[in-house]
Amino acid sequence: MLFSGYPKSAAPDFTYSLPKPKIICMKKITCLFMFVLAGAMAFSQQKLEDGIYLLDQSAGNRHNSPAPQRVAIRFNPQFIEEDPANYDPLFVATDEFFAFANAGKPVIERQSKQVNRVLLQLTGTAAEKLKAFTARNLLKKIVVVVNNEALAVYKIDKPVASGLVVITKCDGQACRQIAKKLRDTI
């Protein structure tokens, strides 16, 4: 017997209850954790080959997790011209793409005082594949991907028959990094 002399129903209540944690706060922390985890998983995909990929513009693709045939990638920070918050992740289709096959070392060509471009000459076979790829995907948007990062988004208005890939609008440092990366893949 806990308290002798008191009837069980009249025993003093010495229990202390702790304040209940705010469930709303815990839910917010859990949601934040899940958001960060999902973001990390979305960008920890397999290594993409350097090349040209179709931009996946399916409805709601910015808010869905990547499908097996698409991968989320980010823009290379050196190619972002505005506020980085305005650049959502891009989803690229991995079932059909064009991988770079360099015929020589990439060349940096100066366009103006601060703007350069990288020129990449393709092998004869790769040039034919690029021409076929661009002919099949007329009026679609493509993403130039180097080192798992988007460098540019273009719309195909005609088949590319020259065998020359041009990556435009990069400053000196960004162009040198891209050229070095492409040189390392030769």
Image: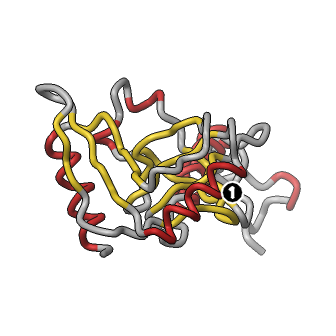
Q: Which residue is mark 1?
A: 66
64 or 21: nearer the viewer: 64
Give me the residue at 15% from left, 45% from top.
Answer: 173
16 or 52: nearer the viewer: 52
Give me the residue at 70% from left, 65% from top.
Answer: 95
Residue furthest toward the left? 113
Q: Quadrant of residue 147?
A: bottom left
**Quadrant containing the N terminus in the rendered view:** bottom right
- 97 sits left or right of 40 in the view: right
124 or 173: nearer the viewer: 124
Residue 108 location (% of width, % of height): 19, 48
- 93 sits left or right of 181 in the view: right
Residue 111 location (% of width, % of height): 20, 31
Give me the residue at 52% from left, 50% from top.
Answer: 161
Query: Counting other residues with Cα less than 10 Å from the Cα at mark 1, is it few (<14), some (14-19), or many (20 or more)?
Result: some
**SS of the residue under disc 1:** loop
Q: Amino acid at mark 1?
A: Pro
- 177 sits left or right of 136 in the view: left
Residue 145 location (% of width, % of height): 45, 55
